[in-house]
Image: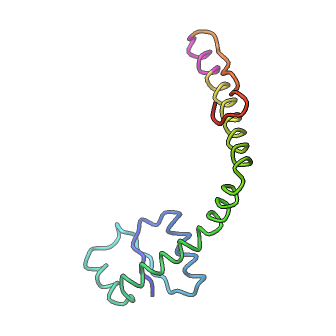
Amino acid sequence: MVFVLDNYDSFTYNLVQYMGELGAEVVVRRNDELTPEEVEAEMERARGYGDLKAAVAAAVIDYLAPVRERYSELRADEGRLEAILADGAARAREIAGETLADVRERMGVGAPHQIPPAPTGTVGG
């Protein structure tokens, strides 16, 4: 049995779902619903903190495996990574420019200014 004591956010939900798929019997209690004595009683039936810690670590490692793989792919091609970052910066700059122009107009503060494009070959301008 695996005992999870948490506020049961989305990360915990995903972790518990995954551990259930692995066949673990998972007991979840919100940290604001139990007294320390009740937690102690629940843990007496669990396999122990060391086993829980190992199970959680394994589940997190497996859950993040696709992220690690994608990171490795991106890092392997520096040119492509720089292009992705430059594209994201250009899109963010465009959105920020439109937002800033709208804010200036609504506040009546000076003429709207265009943010100049980033120099070619740089990331983030």
Please provide percent x and percent y for residue 29: 41, 74
Q: In which quarter of the image is residue 121?
A: top right
Give the residue displayed 56% in from the left and 11% down from the top: 109
Quarter of the picture containing the C terminus is top right
Q: Tell me how many marks there are.
A: 0
Q: Image check: 18 left or right of 73?
A: left
Residue 121, above or below 22: above
Secondary structure mostly seen in the magenta stretch:
helix
Foreground: 34 or 81? 81
Foreground: 103 or 58? 58
Give the residue displayed 68% in from the left and 25% down from the top: 98
Which segment did they paint magenta?
101-109
Please provide percent x and percent y for residue 18: 58, 76
Q: Image check: 78 left or right of 58?
A: right
Please provide percent x and percent y for residue 105: 62, 15
Give the residue displayed 48% in from the left and 75% down from the top: 57
